[in-house]
Amino acid sequence: MNRVAMILIISVTTSLVSGCVPLILIKDGATQKDFDRDYNLCYMEAMQFANNAGSPGNPLFTIPQTRKCMISEKGWNVKKS
């Protein structure tokens, strides 16, 4: 598969997984620095999860795992519209 096709597949897959709607996470009293720290820790855990599943870097694994970690482990909440 050529590189352009792979990038297109990843882009479409990422859009489908994310629901095409940006997820806004909030946490009372948290700063941007707090968010960045928590996000980076969760993303690294998600990357390890994807590696262990035999699919390193796959957004089908990393996106939902990062969100799950941010919400359930780090205490961030989804902002309601």
Image (cartoon, grey):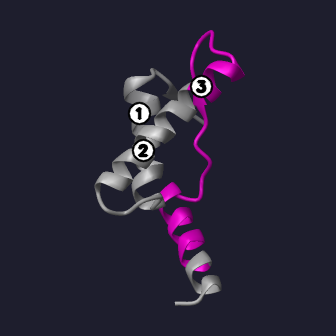
Disc 3: which residue: 37
Say if residue 61 shows up in the picture. yes
- Compute the Cα span from label 3 to label 2: 14 Å
Report helix, strand or loop for mark 2. helix
- Compute the Cα span from label 1 to label 2: 8 Å
Q: Earlier in the sequence, mark 1 or mark 2?
A: 2
Q: Earlier in the sequence, mark 3 or mark 2?
A: 3
Disc 2: which residue: 46
Q: Is residue 69 above or below residue 37?
A: below
Give residue 56's position: percent from left, percent from top: 42, 59
Q: Are marks 3 and 1 in contact (CB under 8 Å)?
A: no
Residue that appears at 39% across and 46% down: 48
- Span of residues in magenta: 8-37
Q: Which mark is residue 69?
A: 1
The three-letter code of the residue at mark 1 reads Cys
The three-letter code of the residue at mark 3 reads Arg
Name the image quarter holding residue 81: top right
Q: Are marks 1 and 2 in contact (CB under 8 Å)?
A: yes
Residue that appears at 45% across and 20% down: 75
Of residue 43 and residue 72, the one placed in the foreground of this image is: 43
Q: Is residue 10 magenta?
A: yes
Left or right: 68 as drawn, with respect to 63: left
Q: Is residue 65 magenta?
A: no
